[in-house]
Image (spheres, rainbow, N blue to C red):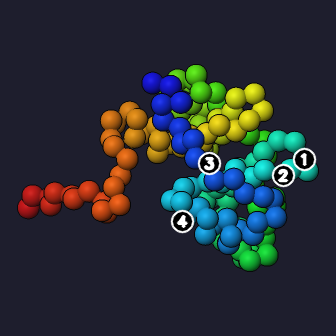
Amino acid sequence: MKVEDGMSELVLMIGPAHTLREAARMMAARRVGAAVVVDPDHAGVGILTERDILNSIAAGESPDTEVAAQHCTQDLVFAARAWTLEDAAAAMVRGGFRHLVVVEGHEVVGLLSMRDIVRCWSGARVPSQAGPPAVSPTPA
């Protein structure tokens, strides 16, 4: 399978001046773990993840005053649609991150997460809004 088979083409894009609270609200509303940070005044993109927000809060910083530009990763590893999921997973493991921004040329065309890869490899369908799957009780 290829990156294009598992990536999300609907990418949450935010600006560098969004506060961490604003970013967290948007991420929670869309049920995603990362947002691509785009600054129209500067070339390139960054990524803000749940982990970035948690690290900031754990350090005692205010999510109402800290902004995405101060906490996003800008030294990114980009993926191409044609990469295999194995190549993408290997890049994530090597880099110690859970998301890859997928680009074509200089345009962001998708986002691939570890969860997307696991979903593809397991053959699982996209989860329904009905809640988590039932778990069988452990035999006594």
| Residue annotated with mark 2 | 39
| Badge number at residue 29 | 4
Q: Is residue 81 above or below residue 125?
A: above
Mark 3: give few (<14), some (14-19) or many (20+) Cα within 10 Å.
Answer: some
Circle 1 packing at 10 Å, graded few (<14), some (14-19), many (20+), is few
Tell me the tag on residue 78.
none
| Numbered mark located on residue 11 in the image | 3
Query: Rounded to the nearest whole Å, what is the CA distance between mark 2 and mark 4?
Result: 22 Å
Tell me which label, 1 or 4, sits earlier in the chain.
4
The residue to which callout 1 is attached is 42
Q: What amino acid is at disc 3?
A: Val
The local crowd at label 4, few if under 14, some if 14 to 19, many if 20 or more residues have their Cα within 10 Å, is: few
Residue type at mark 1?
His
> CB under 8 Å between callouts 2 and 1?
yes
Q: Secondary structure at mark 3?
A: loop
The residue under the point 76% across, 48% down is 46
Q: In the current view of this chain or complex, which residue is farthest to the left?
A: 140
Extreme-right residue of the structure: 41
Q: Which image quadrant for residue 94?
A: top right
Residue 73 visible from this viewpoint = no
Q: Earlier in the sequence, mark 4 or mark 3?
A: 3
Check if mark 2's residue and mark 3's residue have beta carbons within 8 Å. no
Circles 2 and 4: CB atoms closer than 8 Å: no
Q: Residue at x 74, y 77 (%)?
A: 64
* Residue 3: quarter of image: top right
User: Distance from label 3 to label 1 (Cα)?
Assistant: 19 Å
**Label whose residue precedes the other's in the sequence (2 or 4):** 4
